[in-house]
Amino acid sequence: MITELDNNSYYETINSSPKPVLVDFWAPWCGPCLKIGPVLESISLKMESELVFTKINVDNYGEIALER
């Protein structure tokens, strides 16, 4: 399962997760983002014991994407 993050949950998740965190920076208008979304969802179901899968909408929380 992929968890959608916001400004607050992003930092909390990154700083407190005991597992590595994969963050998908995406946007609803981005064609490649929309194509990779279902692939990441499928992988997340198989690897949820090893990684934390998250996503953040850069249209809503672009300042986080700019930091990286």
Image: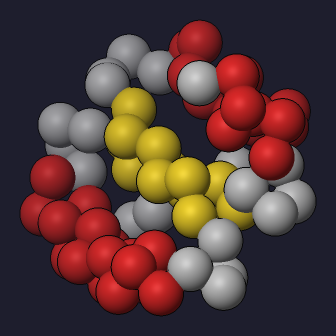
In this rendering, is residue 25 above or below 49?
Answer: below
Kindly identify the residue that appears in the image at 46 percent across and 62 percent down: 2
In this rendering, is residue 45 above or below 4?
Answer: below
x%, y% of residue 31? Answer: 47, 87
Q: Is residue 68 shown left or right of residue 23?
A: right
Within the image, what quadrant is residue 19 found in?
A: top left
Say which of 49 and 39 sits in front: 39
Q: Is residue 10 shown left or right of residue 18?
A: right
x%, y% of residue 25? Answer: 55, 53
In this rendering, is residue 21 above or below 58?
Answer: above
Residue occupying the far left of the picture:
46
Kindly identify the residue that appears in the image at 40 percent across and 66 percent down: 1
Kindly identify the residue that appears in the image at 39 percent across and 32 percent down: 21
**Does residue 45 appear in this view?**
no
Say which of 5 and 59 sits in front: 59
- What colour scheme has been applied to the protein in the rendered image? secondary structure
In this rendering, is residue 42 above or below 18?
Answer: below
Say which of 45 and 10 sits in front: 10
**Does residue 48 appear in this view?**
yes
x%, y% of residue 30? Answer: 56, 80
Kindly identify the residue that appears in the image at 31 percent across and 25 percent down: 20
Q: Is residue 26 shown left or right of residue 21?
A: right
x%, y% of residue 13? Answer: 60, 28
